[in-house]
Amino acid sequence: MNQSLELNSFSGYDPGGFYDEMFEADGSVRPEYAYLLSQIEMVPRKDFTSKQHAAERALLSMGITFNVYSENEGVERIMPIDILPRIITGSQWRELEEGLIQRVTALNLFIDDLYHEQKVIKDGIIPRHVIESSKSFLPQCKGLNPPRGIWCHITGSDLIRDGRGQFMVLEDNLRCPSGVSYMLENREILKKSFPEILENMDVQPVSDYPTRLLDMLQHLSNKAAPTVVVLTPGIYNSAYFEHSYLAQQMGVQLVESSDLIVVDGQVKMRTTSGFETVDVIYRRVDDTFMDPLAFNPESLIGIPGIFEAYRNGKVAIANAPGAGVADDKVVYAYVPRIIQYYLKQEAIIPNVHTYICEEEDSRKYVLEHIEELVVKEANEAGGYGMLIGPKSTKAECEEFRKRILTNPRNYIAQPTISLSRVPTNIDGHFEGRHVDLRPYILYGEKVEVIPGGLTRVAMRKGSLVVNSSQGGGSKDTWVLY
Amino acid sequence: MLSRVANSIYWMNRYIERAENYARFMAVNFNLILDMPPSEKEQWEPLLIANADHHLFQEYFDAPTRDAVLQFMSFDQRNPNSILQCFKQARENARSVREIITKEMWEHLNEFYLHIKELPNSRAWKMGEWQDFFNEVKMASQLFYGIIDSTLTRNESWHFSRLGRFIERADKTSRFVDIKYFILLPNVDAIGTNLDLLQWSAVLKSVSAYNMYRQAFRVLKPEDIVDFLVLDRYFPRSIYYCLSQAEQSLLSISGKEAPLNKALKVVGKLRSELEYTEPSEIIEAGLHEYMDKFQQRNNEVGAAIFEAYFALKPVETFPGDRLEQ
């Protein structure tokens, strides 16, 4: 056949024994993907490839790049986008939505309790030392009442699907979950790549995220027209693009620490015409770096006095300082019990089974079976500080055994889940790649889940690590009605 | 507007203007070489001296050969003023304010920087390739101004953009005039000869002033050329024009009713002095001496702008702010 006319084809596609989101085990297409497949198979191979290239070029000229910490040369990289979307059905989504609302509601009650009466500890649901030894538990926040009683305004929980396609929560991100700009830009790119397919498939929109985010932030202030800012660590932060993108989309100022100052107990920004009061801060800075007076007297970064202003209700901060205690990876293991405790409900979306290395039986099991397990540090993110047993050398496993024995509180382990796969365009043909899903949950007047999210793809063959800092890519996520 | 943001916008524009002028400087020399009688040697050092880059250059190179100077001024990462570095810094500045500027401004800068960063090794470039490159830089800069002109709201961002552009351009135009001083004539008798005028017309062409000058004066005369490049009221690259535009933008930023701050006083004084200067006074003072003095005072304008708008002031210096509550 003439090569220029060759059409896209899935004929040699091999699900490889994994849960494939597009195809059943017998090779037939799942109903939610049927229309997409029929359309994609009518696209000449060549055109598909050029759409793929156009998408990557667009990312580069828009400057949607992230910085990789360890690399000097060419520090900016794009997170590759795979233009074949990932689809979630309306009924799957409704269950996820319900489960996420349940989870975030419970976590917010949990955080508030931890900084007040600590009933959850007194009632023996979670051991005191687990909380007090968590790096993200901030004693400075005790007794603090954040505006509207909300601690976790923006949550990005990472979901995976196991070998049977069951959705599970892998971890919660309650500090500064990133990636939402990719969710938004991926959709914009797919609108250009496949306008007709999108039009015919009734996909729920995500583009109103910035509006919803701004509504949520404004809700935190009593003023009619509060001044909202986004606080970034600066252009060398790996998520800088996102910070400026969100500020731009919301039409608010993007500030760095040095732009802010506390004057007479009020947070102000330095402008060309003097100081201007700030009412709400969407911070993308680690909470303990916000105020040297409150958290780290030796630190030179941060805004002295801002925590005091926050404590006195002069400014709202999202997410609330101290909220990170709920995404400690050891605390994670207790979340189903936390949901049960506060809401008297079963967790709708289950956790991945988790071994708490601090508990003797679990530790013994982990040390004996480390080659089969995934071991994670309690406070790390981004795929750092992590061991994937089946993919590691003997020496690496041994190293982690030592680390666990030295500081068991700092480690958890989970069985290696064979994550679900979605067909992905690799060098001109389709191969299955493992994916996860990070939906975004906003807690304002009510808790709402954005119908979509960031699907991260482990682009390397066989890899289970989807983090952008570890060579991951992304896909647009289509949630159907 | 945030002080930091204003500062970034101002410098983003200065860097782009600087890059454009560097391209123009090198283009002058090619112009000259092609017009020179064969007895004359090409001179590359004046470019460095006029821009005060010669000390840095001497740290890395033995002799100001054509290749070395072109490399140094175009792509050398050790030279903070090289065209590549200017675009890099302009882009970094743009990146830190991209939520303030327009999407088109950012994308243009970003794409052009990525483009020149990836250009194949320029060491073996022929003269034609260099000229294409300089032209490309010039066009990229002018397109950037065009994008600003047609997409940016006439707010503070726009005025700080203009401010940066005109302060930088005033400085660079003075250096174009200066370059004529540094390009040596074979002997004193050559003043006023065809060779002298050839050099002057190369300077005019490099600042896109040749046609406009001809319309204003017709005959090439050094004194008239100085008049045109320094004092003309309407030519957009003349020093006077640049300063008066910068002053206009400063007035718009501070508001016409507000008391004059230091920046406005310094720029207003310099502008009005130029306004009442005769070209003959410049020649009598010595062209180079006059330009040198001007550059110092223009730098004072830059420092006063920094003080008035960008410096991160401690609390006490905004007394009016406490009344806000």
Image (cartoon, coloured by chain):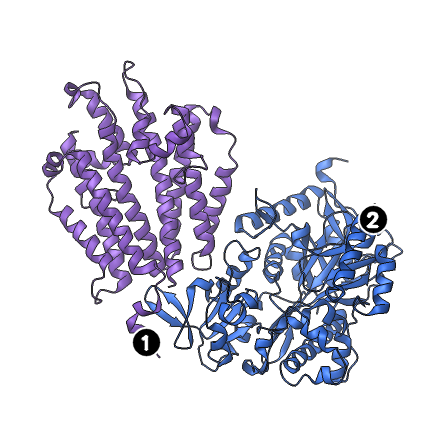
Q: Position of residue A15 (x, y in %)?
A: 84, 52
- Mark 2 secondary-structure assignment: helix
| In the displayed structure image, the side of residue A122 where residue B283 appears, left or right | left
- The chain letter for the residue carrying disc 2 is A
Q: Is residue A323 visible?
A: yes
- Colour of the chain lettered A: blue
Q: Quadrant of residue A376?
A: bottom right
The mark total stands at 2
**Can you say which quadrant of the picture contains the N terminus of chain B?**
bottom left
Give the residue number, with chain letter if any, for mark 1: B322
Give the residue number, with chain letter if any, for mark 2: A394
Q: Position of residue A445 (x, y in %)?
A: 58, 81
Q: Quote the CA–CA distance across marks 1 and 2.
A: 65 Å
Q: Is residue A69 above or below residue A404?
A: above
Which one of the lettered chains is coloured purple? B
Question: Of residues B289 and A138, which is closer to you in this image?
Answer: A138
